[in-house]
Amino acid sequence: MQNIIDRFISYVTIDTESNPDSKTTPSTEKQWVLANKLVEELKAIGMQDVTINNKAYIMATLPSNVEHEVPTIGFVSHFDTSPDFCGANVKPQIVTDYDGKDIVLNAKQNIILSPDYFKDLLQYKGQTLITTDGTTLLGADDKAGITEIVTAMEFLIKNPEIKHGKIRIGFTPDEEIGRGAHFFDVEKFGAQWAYTMDGSQIGELEYENFNAASAKITFKGKSVHPGYAKGKMINSMLIANAFINELPSEEVPEKTKGYQGFYHVHHLNGNIEETIVELIIRDHNLKKFEKRKEKIQKIARKINRKFAKQFGEDIVIAEIKDQYYNMKEKVLPVKHIVDIAEKAMRELNIKPIIKPIRGGTDGSQLSYMGLPCPNIFAGGHNFHGKYEYVPVESMQKAVEVIVKIAELTALPDFGLEQTKKTKKKK
Ligand SMILES: [Zn+2]
């Protein structure tokens, strides 16, 4: 456990905040500091073929230690932290034998991490928690994932009696700004499938995420002196307002959960002459996703028809761009990769929590790039803010899950045939 704590703290105390406004990769120069440190560390623990490219993507190999053919698998995580909250000068606090009561993160500023509000805390009574000091995020997203992968590799190297195939690991920059997979060389990685260690609480196992698109809708208008405007003025803000009112009012993030999709207007900026509305469209179901995009165009056409005579050209222009797709399409044909992870958890007495992600992961992009890639818990909670914390026991369990997946993959039928048989007997 101390090994995990020390390693994790050595990562989170290095600021690696990414920046969506930057055009470079990595988006911030400071990500190199941790990237270079990781390269040295991977070499030091005995990993092979440790490489870092000119965009700070790190890859390394743990060679197979069995004679027979075993599929090469991978584990992936990201070392940047979210630009949503300060990631500099992280001062981790260690709470041992957590008593289930309020944790004072910062006495001076009266910042409390309380189980009254964050009920999840109570399941970690008696465990060791790592928290922030209330002024920064922690960076368990996803330095917990990096810690777990490095620790698992070190464990496998030190315990060669545990049999496994070839394992590839990959660490990326800029996941938090949606670019983590962009320059990931899937061919060079050379794994048949992989797992991102980037989920939240212990047990999480995810292979479904949203289909996602963004829309930028431009409304045009005509400005005329209000005193002489009758029949002449067209106020683009009011047209935009009418457009938003046509969207189903119940299908918004604040009123949906589970598999329910939504439209989310997140930006609105305008004057009489021009108003721009930006929104995102999300749905797990591909057909419904396409329908949602069509609905946007339908409303635009309706308004365009209404103003066709008066305005003379299209008054509404809807530009819709797909962002990412549900990895389920790519993972279901190779469902055993999820089953292996599930079996690994069950063998370690971890209750798998399999649920659809209401968002995307790097794994969804990687899955469409040819590397099917479900997501496994890294253990942290309350990502991207000052209440972020991680139980060390959850990180330890994640290490064990990685080791177990490596073991199962080297077994005949990945150890899955056996499960089916015992299930039948019952
Ligand atoms: Zn993450």
Image (cartoon, grey):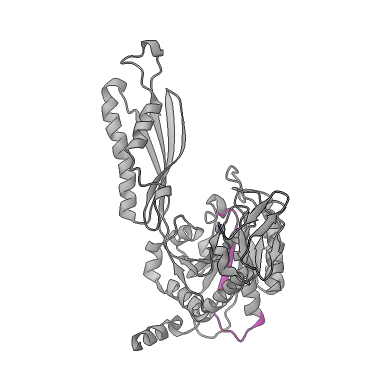
Task: Please give the name of the residue rendered at 71% of the width and 73% of the height, measured from the top-left corner.
Answer: 2
Task: Please give the name of the residue rendered at 50% of the width and 85% of the height, measured from the top-left corner.
Answer: 68
Q: What stretch is highlighted in magenta?
A: 158-175
The part of the image, by quadrant, that contains residue 235 is top left
Q: Which of 238 and 416 is in front in this view?
A: 238
Examine the rendered structure and indicate whether residue 319 appears above or below residue 53.
above
Q: Nearer the viewer, residue 372 or 223?
A: 223
On-image quarter of the C terminus: bottom left
Camera sees residue 379 = no
Examine the rendered structure and indicate whether residue 251 appears above or below residue 1.
above
Examine the rendered structure and indicate whether residue 71 appears above or below residue 219.
below
- Give the image location of residue 90, x and y in percent: 70, 55
- Give the image location of residue 400, x and y in percent: 58, 76
Q: Nearer the viewer, residue 105 or 17?
A: 105
- Give the image location of residue 296, x and y in percent: 33, 40
Q: Which of 386 and 141 is in front in this view?
A: 386
> How many numbered badges does the structure rendering display?
0
The verdict on residue 170 being magenta is yes
On screen, residue 23 versus residue 313, left or right, reads right
Task: Please give the name of the residue rendered at 47% of the width and 72% of the height, measured from the top-left corner.
Answer: 352
On-image quarter of the N terminus: bottom right
The part of the image, by quadrant, that contains residue 330 is bottom left
Q: Residue furthest top?
A: 228
Q: Residue furthest bottom?
A: 425
The verdict on residue 247 being magenta is no
Task: Please give the name of the residue rendered at 63% of the width and 63% of the height, measured from the top-left corner.
Answer: 101
Camera sees residue 187 = yes
The quarter of the image that holds ligand 1 is: bottom right
- Give the image location of residue 227, x and y in percent: 39, 11
On screen, residue 97 versus residue 186, left or right, reads right
